[in-house]
Image (cartoon, grey):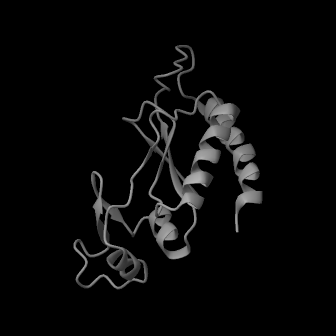
Amino acid sequence: MLLCCSDEGTPYNYFVCCPTWTERLEGLMARFWADMRTACPDFSPAASSVVPELGEGEALAAAARGETDGVAGGSDITGFVGGAANLTMCPTWLVYKHDCLAMTLEMPFKDNAELPIAETAWDGPRSAAFGKAVVEPLLRSLPHLR
């Protein structure tokens, strides 16, 4: 699952994912990011990140089932680097509910700071080219899914 967002303050194209840290999901993520870097120079693996799981397994499982009583933050799961994972966000919920790789793609409004193009900045055709480049890495992931 890929959630696509754009942010005025974001100077890069990058992915954020919050997987339960299994070797299978780590491998899927690493493969996708490597394929994405090959497919599109506008992708920034340096800016991409994983929010690793540091919380209690039972609390995470309960929250994934919607049982938020007694879990700090209600729909948030605490115990993550940099704060909490919000289960009201689709990618995070999917990871915990279905043990699948789900990522958020953040894109710039203005330009990619790693490959700026002064004449056009980050425009519609460039965004469309990035979207087209995502398809091949997604297709390459299919044989590795359950």
Against 110, residue 119 (above or below) is: above
Where's residue 71, x and y in %?
25, 78
Against 89, residue 74 (above or below) is: below
The single residue placed furthest to the top in the displayed view is 118
Specify the quadrant that holds the N terminus: bottom right
Against 20, residue 47 (above or below) is: above
The residue shown at (46%, 23%) is 113
- 42 relative position to 9: left or right: right
Against 128, residue 68 (above or below) is: below
Q: Who is closer to the viewer here, 6 or 65? A: 65
The residue shown at (55%, 58%) is 23
Specify the quadrant that holds the C terminus: bottom right
The residue shown at (37%, 61%) is 53
Quadrant hosting residue 38: top right
Quadrant hosting residue 37: top right
- 26 relative position to 82: left or right: right
Where's residue 62, x and y in %?
37, 82
Where's residue 126, x and y in %?
63, 30
Number of numbered markers: 0
The single residue placed furthest to the front in the displayed view is 23
The residue shown at (70%, 38%) is 133
- 28 relative position to 7: left or right: right
Q: Who is closer to the viewer here, 7 or 63? A: 63
Where's residue 27, x and y in %?
60, 52
